[in-house]
Image (cartoon, rainbow, N blue to C red):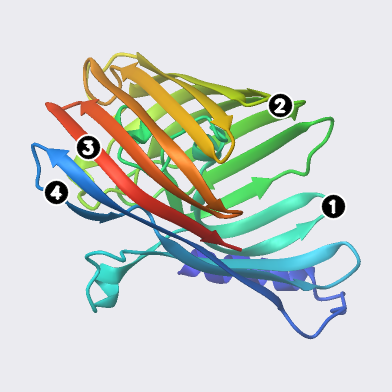
Amino acid sequence: MYRLTLFLSLIFIGLSNYEAKATEIKTKVYGEINVAYEARDPADDDFKSHVSRIGVKGDLPLTESLKIIYQIEQEVDLVSGGLRAEELFSMRNTLIGVSGNFGKLFFGTHDTPMKRSQGKADLFNDQAGDIKNILNGDVRAKESFFYHSPKFNRFRVQLAFVPSDENFDASSSASVTWSKNGLYLGFASDQKMRKNDKAIAKTKVYDTQRFSTVYKTGPWQMNAILQQSKRINQIGAQRESGYSLGLSYAFNQYKLVAQTGRSDIIKSDANFYNFGIERKLAKNAKAYLYHSSVDKDGEENITSLGIEYKFK
C-alpha cells in the first residue's frame, strides 16, 4: 500500500502547476462473458467460465496533452463463483497513472510486457488450450511500475519493474513490438520474473526470452511463438525451450482454428494440440466448438462448446 501512496504523491506533486481542463472523469464500462460446457476426460463434464470479466476505465484531462488514467478490472466466475466476493471476483488489470505524448506511466496490477508481447499469437487464449499450459511468462504483476511508449516508426516499447519483497528479488520485463501490413513481430525478455502463486514454496522464478509473430493475409492467419526459459530458483535447472504454432482460415461467418506446441520449460516433453470452429454471431459475439488435448502431467482431453460476448 505504501508504494501506491508514494506513486500517487509523486503524480500530484508533479502536476501541482497544472489546471484540469475538465472537472468530470471520463469513464467507460467494458467486459467479457465467456461460458462453455466442457466434456473432459478424465475429469467430470461441467460448465466453465473462461476468464469472464468486468471493468471500468477512464481518464481526467489536465492539459491538452496530459491526463490522469485509471482502470479497475475484475474476473467474474459466472459458473461456480457463488455469493462470496472472494470466490466470485479476482483482480485483473487495475492501475492508476498518467498518460501524454511520452506514453503511459502507471502503477498497480497489470499484465507484464512479456505476456502482452504475444499479441494475437495464441489462438486459444483464455481457453482450455491456452499456451500457458506448456509455456511460462503468463504473469500479471502486482504492486508494480509500468511504462508503455507511443508508437514510433511502427515500434512500441513496454517496460515493467516489480519491486523486491521479503521473499524474492526485484523482477523486470521488457518488450519491443512492430507491425505493418498484416505482419506483427514481438520480442520480450523477463529477468527474475515470478508468478503470484499463493504458496511461496511453489513460486517459480524464470529468466525468459520470447519471440512472437502473427501474419495475416486475406482469410489466412499464421502464428508462432518461440521461447527459451531458465528457472533460476531451482538448483541445477537448465535453459529449456518451447514453441507454439497456429493457423486459422476465415470464410463467411466462420473461422477454422488449429494450434500445436511442445515445451520442456514447465514439464519435460509437455505438448498440446487444439482445433475448432468459430461462428460469428454479431460484431462482438461468437459461438465456438473447440477440442484441446494437453499432455503435461498425463493426457487430458477437453471439448468445449461455448459463447463469447465482449462489450466495450
Q: CA distance from mark 1 to mark 2?
A: 26 Å
Numbered circle sitting on residue 182:
2
**Residue behind mark 3:** 302
Report the front residue among 165 and 206. Answer: 206
**Residue behind mark 1:** 101
- Residue at the outermost right position: 64
Mark 1 or mark 4, whichever is nearer to me: 4
Sequence-first tag of 2 and 3 = 2
Q: CA distance from mark 3 to mark 4?
A: 9 Å
Q: Residue at x 11, y 26 (%)?
A: 298
Q: Tell me the crowding category of disc 2: few under 14, some 14 to 19, or many 20 or more residues within 10 angstroms, Cα based.
A: few
Q: Is residue 28 left or right of residue 272?
A: right
Give the residue type that dot 4 points to.
Asp
Give the residue type that dot 2 points to.
Gly
Report the front residue among 265 and 288. Answer: 288
Disc 1 is placed on an element classified as loop
**Residue behind mark 4:** 45
> Are the residues flagged by discs 1 and 2 in contact, CB closer than 8 Å?
no
Q: Quadrant of the C terminus?
A: bottom right
Give the residue type that dot 3 points to.
Ile
Q: CA distance from mark 4 to mark 2?
A: 39 Å
Point out residue 77 in the picture as x, y percentages from the top left corner.
31, 64
> Are the residues flagged by discs 1 and 4 in contact, CB closer than 8 Å?
no
**Is 188 rendered above or below residue 158?**
above
